[in-house]
Amino acid sequence: MEKTATHLEYTKETALRFLTMGKSGVEGLYGQADTTRREHMGDDVYIRGIIEFSNVCANNCLYCGIRAGNRKVRRYTLSADEIIETASAMATRHQMTVVLQAGESPAFGDDLLGGIIRRIKKETPLSVTVSVGNRSRETYRYWKECGMDRYFLRFETSDPGLFLRLHPGSTLEERLRCLGDLQDLGIQTGSGFMIGLPGETLNILAQNILLCRELDLDMIGIGPFIPHPDTPLGEKRNVYNDNPEMFFKALAVLRIFNPDAHIPATTAYDALFPEKGRDLALQRGANIFMPNNTPACHRKDYLLYPDKPGVDDPVDQYLESAVSRIRALGRKVGEGPGHSIKKRKALTLQR
Ligand code: SAM
């Protein structure tokens, strides 16, 4: 393992060498990722509760189960009161951040969401992360004024041609413009990608990891692509279908290249490796757990991919299991907002 190089000196060749490491080297890679996580982020695992508040979407991303063209989806949108009620219940359950996620629905106006952010900030102690896709700089600025702390928007793939094929009518350039706007506005910014999209090469995977480092992200969420039968990619396989170790190698390399970022153990890991995927992710670089707080009656309607875990579990049970999983790994549940440590470091430098 390269002990002497700093994470900024690692090259794409280093990433490729890590990613193609055989069985004999892989435990060392995971060990290095875990040590990096511990040294930079500590043993706290922050629990951020997601509310998937609407599955209405105007986009037609080729991989996504809630794409506009999927007529089988029963569409729903929670009311402002339902969202605030759900968020209010979170603070008593170890969750100090609410992640408001939805499809890209222009009908869900800026003012409506702005008002919801304001009320959550006024009525609860929660930090607010929003994840509703590409929006204008003005909208991001307005939501920041309303109290939004963070924004999460994956770039999905760093390859412009592949991005265009997967997202009709949208470009990687535009997505990166959004991320740039968010960062300029001083909003804690998260992004990431899917692993194993049809058409992805190992070179693109390495490039995805490098782009995360280049963007200097506060949070990075990655997860395996899982084909959804009611999408144009339904018949395709994940590129690493026969080599699932790659999902964890990618996570470990991501941590080594991005030591100061918050990295969630995403739900897709549990979908592919039931009941242990997220535990393994937490041991191989991740430090965030994101339980689903969407009201049970709607969870089955937010199926980005099939076999999404936890859609039937009551929130309390789901949360209890998250806490015991974290503790069983010898880790602690993080207290407080768990803001970006990059901001903290920058503030310390300013003093
Ligand atoms: N509309 C917002 C956006 O695009 O950022 C938030 C919702 S979007 C459905 C959330 C994420 O789900 C996407 O960024 C994508 O990476 C992931 N996703 C969608 N379909 C998936 C699939 N079939 N397999 C794995 N992840 C998927």
Image: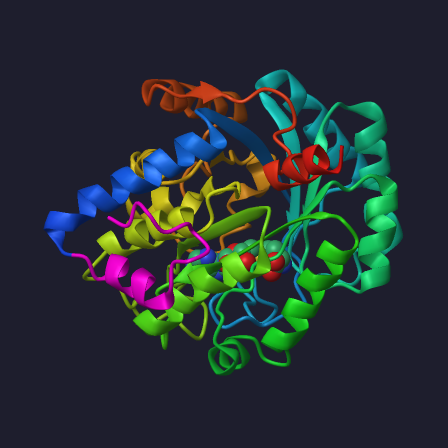
Main secondary structure along the magenta-highlighted residues: loop
Note whether residue 26 is visible. yes
Q: Is residue 242 left or right of residue 239?
A: left
Badge count: 0
Residue 62 % position (x, y): 49, 73
Question: At x 64% / y 68%, what residue is drawn?
Answer: 176
Note whether residue 307 is visible. no
Question: At x 71% / y 28%, what residue is drawn?
Answer: 126
Residue 115 % position (x, y): 87, 42
Foreground: 148 or 18? 18
Question: At x 58% / y 33%, what residue is drawn?
Answer: 48
Q: Is residue 138 left or right of residue 204?
A: right
Q: Is residue 232 left or right of residue 142?
A: left
Q: Residue furthest left?
A: 24
Residue 220 % position (x, y): 52, 50
Q: Is residue 246 above or below residue 331?
A: below
Q: Is residue 130 magenta?
A: no
Foreground: 229 or 14? 14
Foreground: 53 or 50? 50
Residue 170 % position (x, y): 63, 77
Question: At x 30% / y 37%, what residue is drawn?
Answer: 280
Question: The C terminus is located in which quarter?
Answer: top right
Specify the segment rendered in magenta. Answer: 1-21
Q: Is residue 7 magenta?
A: yes
